Amino acid sequence: MSYYSLILETIKHLYMDIMKTLLITSKKTKTDFLIKMKGYGQLAILLLFILTTQYSLIAQQYAFLKIEDSSEKPKALVAGDQYDGKLYQQELKNRDNGKWQFISTGDGYYHIVDVRHGMALAAGNIYDGHVYHQQPNNRDNAKWRLVEKANNKYQIIDKKHGKALVGGDVFDGKVYHQDPGLRSNALWNLTVIDGAQNRIAPKEIVLFEKHLNTVYDIDKKVLDNNSSPKTSTLSAKYTNNTSREQTHEISESTQFTNSETWETTESISNEIWTEITATVGWKAGGGGGMEATVANTFGFGNTTTNTKSKGGSATVTTTISFKSNTVIPAGMTTTCKQLIRSEKASVPFLTTAIRTYGDGSTKEIKVPGVWKGTLLSRSEVTCTEQ
């Protein structure tokens, strides 16, 4: 029996005793009743204290989430500032009545309870198309499951009726209980706003993604037929004005800025892209017996966000350089030139990451994708003396 039920049972017995006593006139019986009533009262107070303490302890274990619709200017699911048993769609404004805890009921469903009032989302006991803000009392119409449908967007479905939490087809600040269909107003973004590190959140949502590695398969690149290859030249020279030969390092570098995009086969956190870099070296051609090394480094990066997606864009800076350690005879000038041929290509990749879910479980994922518009360069360095 739940604490709620125990308190209700105690009150029920107390009420029955009161009704019996109204029919009794003996002083002794009334005295006995007063003693019994005092005992019931103390027990009810004790049970209420235990219930309140128990709920407080449970509530402290669960993260606070905001529930927002999926429109361009999302509004949050909010209970009344003063308790009124209703639910609204409004701006959150950091109100506790718009922060929700998903408390598992042990059967794959959740009681969704607000932080301010401690009341839960509940559909009607008999289906009526409305959603209420009430004590859950372990009712199936106050149990909800999450069904992921898109990029961190979920349908919220009750257990009893199998209907969804839905905003108005045209925004009206209200919340309904209907078949979700394919409507975007039946999709909700769930974001942990407090307790992501140390509290329990719904097991269906991803709290963190830690990037392990990304492997780019340059050999499987596909050249962009819509862009023309570009050729450029880097040049550097050194004159030995002494009467002895010298060993000297001749080097030069340049940078190109390029807009690129990426796509993956499933939604993945943009945060991992801030950690991804790739380096590709290209062979240098020698000239006049000179040895040179060439470096072509390009980085893949994106702005850190708290969303998941299947694609994005980035502005990438490519650095191309060469370095030649050259023996220069007395009175001679050595000139090194790097011929650079750049062209855009699509490069396939495979990203490995660790996902941490709301219940603390982890899973390694491998997500293939393609980086489009990557600027690839091939270089050849030639050094001559004169």
Image (cartoon, helix red, strand yellow):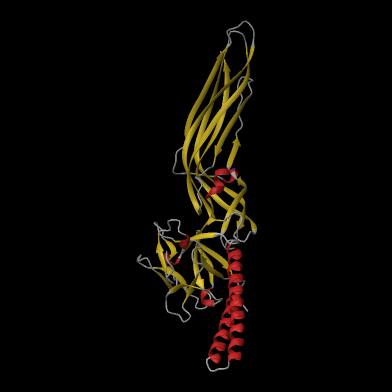
| Residue 266 at least partly seen | no
Residue 50 in the image: above or below residue 248:
below
Say which of 335 and 271 sits in front.
Answer: 271
Residue 107's x, y, as percent? 61, 73
Residue at x 47% of width, y 36% of height: 257
Residue lying farthest front? 27
Tell me the quarter of the picture where residue 80 sits. Answer: bottom left
Residue at x 52% of width, y 78% of height: 160
| Tally of numbered discs | 0
Residue 44's x, y, as percent? 59, 77
Residue 264 in the image: above or below residue 54:
above
| Residue 358 at least partly seen | yes
Residue at x 59% of width, y 80% of height: 38
Quadrant in which the C terminus appears: top right
Horizontally, residue 70 falls left or right of residue 347, namely left
Say which of 314 and 222 sits in front.
Answer: 314
Residue 14's x, y, as percent? 57, 84
Residue lying farthest top? 243
Quadrant in which the N terminus appears: bottom right
Residue 260 in the image: above or below residue 245:
below
Residue 19's x, y, as percent? 53, 90
Say which of 29 and 346 sits in front.
Answer: 29
Horizontally, residue 116 falls left or right of residue 107, namely left
Residue 159 in the image: above or below residue 189:
below
Tell me the quarter of the picture where residue 108 sits. Answer: bottom right
